[in-house]
């Protein structure tokens, strides 16, 4: 059996960043398992720019950002195998047994002292949205269309309506337009967009593509190929208002209605998931509830920027390395701080903080449930205010974070930390 | 080529009948209007192998259901089709409904249904903890099961073809002529000849019957469904029905043979071809299913779909008879529920009708009853998988992540009988694209494989035949 200190599931931006961080922390016996035919993950099809502003201080395309990390992996001589799928994770006698499959070697097992999950996410499909109407060809998730256009050089359609204003949908509105398609409208069922503001400006406004909020696709028309869609306003309960509908002739409907962390492997291994994020429940080290198994990137929770994926994955990589160095011996646990989601906070990552006295400052990421303007972000421990910061604007599409000082954790190692929006 | 028997309609009944006839030295063909088999009622239904306590004793439905369910257990092994004898449970929610259960029980006994018994509401809730508090009693049928209806149809057609039957797809029958003891069945310019013709056209059976002067009226009833993620498949282990009554009949909650959870169907009279999904329908499903269990997590819906029942206005029972107007022409009309359960027995019944009519039916000694599914790989042990990967590395290359489908399985689906020629055909055979991302990742790869295998351009690949093209051309 193959033996590695760390096996990383997924060679996208998360997996590569975790690998480099673990290596730089002194753990060199690492294997990245990638299911596609090269490292890079979904970034390989994201040929637009806007990546890397935080991480590298410059604007890169997706493939460029991925190439930087692939180069870092290569420079360190970190092992990786491509075209290989991880089938299962099981607790072994020492660490975790990772069962994988590829064409060359068939199904085989790898022994890992620690595992880092970095499988990324997938798009919510039409079925999950239960859009009424027929089921013709011409309905794609934005990411599928992106792959057709950017990787395969094929056009999925010419007359396009987009449902959902997630970032991939916004990016594809511009991309399809540049390729000569007519993008009629982007509909968003919520009263606000789920995408980054800069994408709304650069991908819609600059191309005169209307964004209709509180609007959804009420019906899909067409027998064999989409011939049109009925779009309609929705009320505050997100029910369609039939009187406020219009028919738009089109041959393609792209869906950009949210991303779902890809956690088949995780849940099959019996690891607890957070029902809101769809990712594993983790502590500040991004360690899941299965010892020695860490998670980072979009498989943990959907990030808005890849830069944050890299940052989070470095935490997971370094933690996995520490875990191995300490021979799986944890520093004496003083307690676990529970993180409570207060008013307006949909989820936090991590969901808890293990206090060992060795913690550094902990960054807690979170997303809000709606748009807030001119509010205070309040953090309290056991009911006592730790900090309060003025926030000009907070939106569900953009990830937020607060930093929790070591002194706050050490003072209340079994405390409840509450993050809330004070309106 | 002149055939002994031409079967119009590649649904589960047509396919199983073709297979049954291949047990004899006969030349048989199946004429299918669409680009693949199992595209009518056989595609979108509940996938239940019913015990047989519902039909009125003495009817064809009663007889063929019980017999079909019995044959099914052997059939699924021969054809390598996923099937699970999970049992069914009809729920009653008040004393009046408990009385109705007793009637159903007596009916079942009269029909010869095995493993049928009544249990208390408490016992039902003990067996199925997700059931609603208000369950007052249940009728259990342990001989009932679940099956994937299109998997069965594809396997039956494939096995019939492996044994020499022909399948003509994209062959919507437009005219039938009889001359000197020979039928000419036409589809536009195309035509085939046959001695016997079997009308197994499902929702289109009345239209086909009219071509030989037989009058029936099909009144299609639409059923809408919600399919949930595999993570929800364990909510119930039995197929859960409700006593038919004021709340309509037939909203069931059931695991599927592939491990998903299925909720539905509605029942609305509609027009032929209408398989649209409606908000009203989906709301109705949720409202009625809530009586059985309130624990269905609709956030985990991965697909909503609708199918048409081929109900016939002329009869409550199946119509299986020789035409009154045309010799050697068998009408199979109104094959609605329990059509799937009955199909294996209908096939035998039709073969006997042909024999009785004088068709020479000499046993075909070389008939091979078995077929290996393209999904067989997934059921193998690690050693078995490694052997297959060694022989064909494509089995080591995973394409669909949600349902763990390899390139080898997809190629098998495209290459084996009946060959998959579209994305949906691949999906029905392999489940690639049927998982929670519904093809988000694998669609582009499968388009490529379909194009390569068929020697066509990717822009010619369709979702389900006709002009359901996936792509419109190249980028700039």
Image: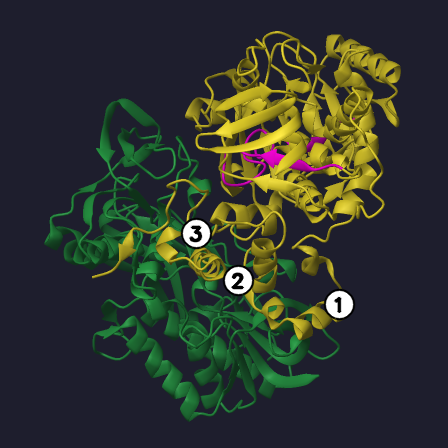
Compared to residue B131, the image places residue B400 above or below, namely below
Q: Which residue is mark 2?
A: B399
Residue B408 relative to residue B129: left or right = left
Element assignment for label 2: strand
Q: Alpha carbon of mark 3 to alpha carbon of mark 2: how far? A: 39 Å
Compared to residue A341, the image places residue B149 above or below, namely above
| Residue range of the region highlighted in magenta in the rendering | B26-51
State the predominant SS element of the stretch in magenta: loop
Q: Which residue is mark 3?
A: A341
| Residue B154: x %, y % from top left | 64, 43
Instruction: Name the tint of chain A in the rendering.
Output: green
Residue B457 relative to residue A2: left or right = left
User: What chain is colored yellow?
Assistant: B
Q: Would residue B339 be counted in the magenta stretch?
A: no
The circle on residue B384 is 1
Q: Which is in the foreground here, disc 1 or disc 3? A: 1
């Amino acid at each position: 059996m193959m033996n590695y200190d760390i096996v990383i599931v997924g060679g996208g931006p998360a997996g590569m960043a975790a690998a480099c961080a673990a290596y730089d922390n002194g753990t060199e016996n690492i294997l990245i398992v990638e299911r596609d035919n090269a490292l890079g993950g979904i970034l390989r099809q994201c040929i637009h720019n806007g990546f890397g502003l935080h991480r590298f201080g410059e604007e890169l395309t997706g493939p460029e950002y991925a190439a930087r990390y692939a180069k870092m992996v290569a420079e360190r001589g970190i092992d990786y195998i491509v075209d290989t799928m991880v089938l299962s994770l099981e607790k072994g006698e020492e660490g975790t047994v990772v069962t994988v499959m590829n064409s060359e070697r068939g199904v085989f097992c790898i022994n890992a002292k620690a595992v880092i999950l970095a499988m990324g996410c997938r798009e919510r499909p039409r079925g999950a949205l239960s859009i009424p109407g027929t089921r013709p060809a011409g309905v794609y998730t934005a990411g599928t269309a992106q792959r057709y256009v950017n990787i395969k050089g094929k056009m999925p359609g010419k007359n396009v309506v987009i449902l959902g204003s997630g970032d991939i949908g916004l990016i594809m509105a511009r991309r399809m337009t540049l390729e000569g398609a007519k993008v009629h409208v982007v509909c968003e069922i919520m009263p606000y967009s789920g995408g980054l503001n800069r994408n709304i400006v650069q991908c819609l406004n600059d191309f005169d593509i209307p964004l209709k909020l509180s609007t959804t696709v009420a019906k899909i028309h067409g027998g064999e190929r989409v011939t049109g869609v009925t779009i309609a306003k929705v009320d505050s309960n997100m029910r369609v208002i039939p009187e406020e509908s219009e028919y738009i002739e089109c041959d393609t409907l792209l869906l950009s209605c949210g991303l779902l962390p890809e956690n088949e492997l995780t849940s099959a291994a019996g690891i607890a998931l957070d029902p809101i994020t769809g990712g594993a429940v983790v502590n500040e080290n991004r360690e899941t509830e299965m010892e020695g198994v860490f998670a980072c990137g979009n498989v943990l929770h959907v990030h808005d920027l890849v830069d944050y994926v890299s940052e989070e994955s470095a935490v997971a990589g370094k933690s996995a390395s520490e875990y191995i160095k300490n021979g799986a011996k944890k520093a004496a646990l003083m307690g676990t701080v529970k993180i409570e989601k207060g008013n307006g906070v949909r989820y936090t990552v991590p969901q808890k903080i293990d206090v060992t006295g060795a913690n550094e400052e902990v960054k807690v990421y979170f997303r809000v449930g709606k748009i807030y303007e001119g509010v205070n972000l309040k953090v309290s421990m056991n009911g006592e205010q730790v900090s309060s910061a003025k926030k000009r604007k907070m939106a569900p599409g953009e990830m937020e974070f607060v930093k929790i000082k070591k002194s706050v954790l050490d003072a209340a190692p079994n405390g409840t930390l509450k993050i809330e929006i004070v309106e | 080529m002149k055939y002994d028997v031409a079967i119009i309609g590649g649904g589960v009944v047509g396919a199983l009948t073709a297979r049954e006839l291949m047990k004899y030295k006969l030349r048989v063909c199946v004429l299918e209007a669409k680009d693949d088999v199992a595209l009518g009622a056989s595609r979108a239904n509940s996938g239940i192998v019913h015990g047989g306590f519902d039909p009125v004793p003495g009817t064809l439905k009663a007889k063929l259901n019980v017999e079909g369910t019995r044959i099914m257990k052997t059939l699924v092994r021969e054809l390598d089709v996923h099937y699970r004898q999970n049992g069914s449970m009809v729920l009653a929610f008040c004393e009046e409904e408990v009385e109705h259960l007793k009637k159903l029980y007596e009916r079942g006994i009269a029909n010869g249904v095995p493993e049928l018994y009544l249990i208390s509401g408490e016992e039902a809730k003990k067996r199925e903890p997700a059931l609603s508090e208000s369950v007052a009693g249940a009728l259990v049928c342990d001989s009932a099961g679940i099956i994937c209806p299109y998997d069965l149809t594809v396997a039956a057609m494939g096995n019939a073809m492996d044994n020499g039957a022909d399948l003509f797809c994209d062959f919507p029958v437009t005219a039938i002529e009889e001359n000197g003891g020979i039928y000419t069945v036409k589809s536009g310019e195309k035509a085939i000849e046959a001695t016997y013709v079997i009308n197994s056209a499902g929702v289109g059976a009345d239209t086909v019957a009219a071509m030989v002067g037989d009058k029936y009226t099909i009144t299609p009833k639409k059923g809408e469904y919600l399919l949930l993620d595999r993570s929800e498949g364990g909510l119930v282990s039995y197929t859960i029905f409700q006593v038919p009554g004021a709340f309509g009949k037939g909203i069931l909650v059931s695991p599927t043979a592939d491990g998903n959870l299925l909720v539905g169907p509605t029942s609305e009279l509609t027009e032929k071809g209408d398989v649209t999904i409606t908000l009203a329908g989906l709301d109705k499903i949720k409202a009625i299913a809530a009586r059985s269990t309130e624990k269905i997590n609709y956030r985990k819906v991965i697909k909503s779909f609708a199918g048409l029942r081929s109900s016939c206005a002329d009869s409550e029972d199946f119509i299986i008879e020789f035409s009154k107007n045309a010799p050697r022409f068998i009408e199979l009309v109104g094959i609605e529920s329990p059509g799937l359960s009955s199909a294996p027995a209908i096939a035998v019944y039709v073969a006997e009708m042909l024999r009785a009519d004088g068709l020479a039916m000499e046993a075909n000694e070389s008939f091979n009853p078995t077929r290996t599914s393209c999904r067989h790989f997934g059921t193998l042990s690690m050693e078995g998988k490694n052997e297959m990967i060694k022989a064909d590395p494509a089995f080591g290359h995973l394409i669909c992540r949600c349902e763990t489908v390899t390139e080898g399985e997809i190629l098998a689906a495209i290459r084996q009988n009946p060959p998959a020629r579209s994305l949906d055909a691949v999906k029905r055979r392999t489940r690639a694209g049927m998982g929670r991302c519904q093809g988000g990742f694998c669609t582009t790869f499968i388009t490529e494989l379909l194009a390569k295998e068929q020697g066509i351009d990717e822009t010619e690949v369709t979702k389900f035949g006709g002009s359901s093209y996936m792509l419109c051309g190249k980028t700039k």
